[in-house]
Each structure stands twice: as structure tokens, then as C-alpha cells.
Image: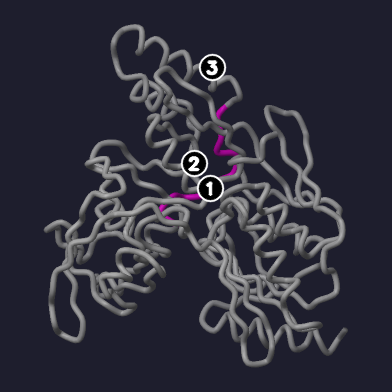
Amino acid sequence: MSGRDLFCQPRRIRRGAALTLVFAGVLATGAATGSFDGSGRNGASAREGAHAPAGHRDDVVDAAAEAAADGKSPVEAAERAVSRSGDRWGAVYSRGEYEEFEDALDGQYTGVGLWARRERDGRIEVTRVQAGSPARTAGIRKGDRLRSVDGHSVDGRPVTEVVSLLRGDATDASAGTTVALGLERDGRAWNETLRRARLSTDSVTVRELADGVSVIKVDAFTKGSGDLVRTAVAAAEPDAGIVLDLRGNSGGLVTEAVTTASAFLDGGLVATYDVDGDQRALHADPGGDTTRPLVALVDGGTMSAAELLTGALQDRGRAVVVGSRTFGKGSVQMPSRLPGGSVAELTVGHYRTPSGRSVDGRGLTPDVEAEAGALKRAETMLSGLGDAS
């Protein structure tokens, strides 16, 4: 097992105008956004056993090879084969798309450095501007309204479509290409033309609350994120509690999720999984902090490798889980190379938590249900955990 992207949340909605990615965090959005509107995040209906038989990998590869031999598109042939197979999480990428996907897993993306969300009235609001990005250089701020991208109004559009426009997916935009933004602040409208750049994602952020509690927010399990979490735990106030915020985390590199688990566990089982019926296991490294009070925050956007981590901490009694039921994506994908350098990522099995629970189609139920005010509830729980210790 390479551990590179077995439990990543896919990805493809359609081909054509854009490569649309269904990640619920920085990994997904890259150039633009860290949140979906409600319909985008949970748009796919979760169900048990939503993976095709193991032999469908051969069918997909054969279909692509036959199409290439006939002078047709191997990618389109592979997509049809995936659709027929019933593999809900299967996805097919061209060479360039897969390279872009791998860059995202490595914590890199091409964009302008904006995060945004859609408000209830359909307006798109900037929620964060990355330091050192073209957007920050242009003076764009949190709270600004994004009105248009390259002349296309974005009001009422799903955030995923706004992301696609900002990235320039329809035109295979790269670093150095320009994008024209229409913006508004305090009733004043203006336009900015930015040059896209190669940027690094900030998948792990840390802040300290007034009572010394550290909030470690993990947006996605990109390369190096596990070590960043371990560093944050080591640097936290002695004996102070930690909130591990996994809300909106759609997964990423399973090795990074296991490394994150290792920050809080002294070795032991993190998850089991099967690949075409072959049972395997994932274990934490020894030496983690097992005494510090810990609360994990989750919601409906907590998916895949983030659910794997949550299940391990919950089953092993290491964390109190607060929030709402997680998404329920517990299947395993592996890549298969196709003619011309394209790649099919196909489902080969499922994983289970240390106690044997299946996540796929079910999600994980938090120990304490909370939506509004979840962080405050987590602080209250930490106070009780600290008193108990």
C-alpha cells in the first residue's frame, strides 16, 4: 500500500467546461474556496456497498485501450465503463488533470489565493485571503463580495463553479494567466485583474483560545499535515486541552491521517481495510500524547481519511467527538494507468474503525450532538475532561 490517496474523496462530476472537484476544503478548491454550500457538500446520496466488483478495473482499462486503438478518446471510454460498473466513487482523469490532483495532495495549487462561501441570498463572499497571494497583493479582504469572474456573474452559482472559473479550468489556465474579478465592498464596486500563481495550501492552522486551549484546524490531509499537527501538539500549553477541528475535512493522504493519529495515540490500531478481499491494517506510531484532554469536532463535511482518524480516536477512547454525523465515505480507491497517461481511480474495498464499525454509507455519530456553537461546546467538554484528569 502506497498510502498516497487510497481514502481521498473524489472528485469528478462531469467533463467538458471544467474539472469539478468534490472536496470540501482547501484540497478541493485550490484556488478559491474552503467551503461548499449545503447542497454541494452533501449532494451525493451515501449508501452501503457502493463499489463495483474488483474485476471492473480490468473492464475500465480494456475499454480505454480499445478506444485508443480505434482512434477514440480513452478517457471518455473509461468514464462510460466506470459509470456502467456502478462504482460511485470511481473517477477518470486526463494526464493533466491527474497531475493537478497530485499537486493538490502535495499541498500545491494554481490560483489567486481566495477562499469564499455562498451566502443565503446567493451572493459569494470572500472568507479568507491567503498571505502572499495575488489576491492579498491586490488588496482584496475578507468580507468583500465577489460579483463576477471574467465577466461571468457568480451570484447564485454553486461554490464549485466559482472555483472552476477562478482556476480557469475550462481554458487549462496555468500560473501567469490572468483572471478578471468584479468585487464590491461597502457598496463600492470595482474590478481587479490578477495573475494566477503557484501557491501552497495552508491545510493546518493553529490558534489559542483565552483559556489556553489550542484549536488545531485540519482542512485536508495534504503532504506534511500530520507532522504539522504533531508539532502543534508538542508546542501547546502543558496540560491544556486541544480541539482537533475536522469539520469540512474531506480527506486526503491516508498516511497523513495516520501520522495525525500518532500525535494522540501510543501505537496501536488505527483502521483495517480490504483491497479486493485482502485484509490489511494501519497502525499508529508509538509515543503520542495520550493524556492531554482532546475533543474532535466533526460535521457532514468530515469525510474519508478524516472519518478514519475520527473513528480511531473515538473507538480507542482517546477523544470526545462533538458535532454532527459525518458524511459516510469509507471506501478505498486505487489508481490504474490508462493509455495516453490518463488515470482511473477505482474502488477496491472498504475500511473499518478499530472496533470493526463500517463507515461507508453510515458515517460516524458524535458522542455529543452540536451544530451551532459546536466549538463552545467543545471548550465546555474540555473543561470537564481536565477536571476529571
Q: Is residue 338 left or right of residue 118?
A: right
Considering only order in the chain, which callout, 1 or 3, is on the residue closer to the N terminus? 3
Q: Disc 3 to disc 2, how far (Cα)?
A: 23 Å
Left or right: 90 in relation to 221: left
Q: Position of residue 47 (x, y in %)?
A: 54, 46
Q: What's the magenta region?
A: 42-52
- Residue 1 place in picture, x, y as percent: 70, 34
**Image quarter of residue 215:** bottom right
Q: Residue furthest bottom?
A: 210
Query: Is residue 18 positioned above or below 155 on the image?
Result: above
Q: Determine crowd level at label 1: few under 14, some 14-19, many 20+ residues with C-alpha closer than 10 A.
A: many
Work out whether 184 lies above or below 110: below
Q: Secondary structure at mark 2?
A: helix
Q: Residue 288's spot in the image, x, y percent?
A: 82, 63
- Comes first in the chain, label 3 or label 2: 3
Q: Which residue is mark 1?
A: 106
Q: Residue beneath label 2, please?
A: 102
Q: Nearer the viewer, residue 137 or 296?
A: 137
Mark 3 residue type = Asp
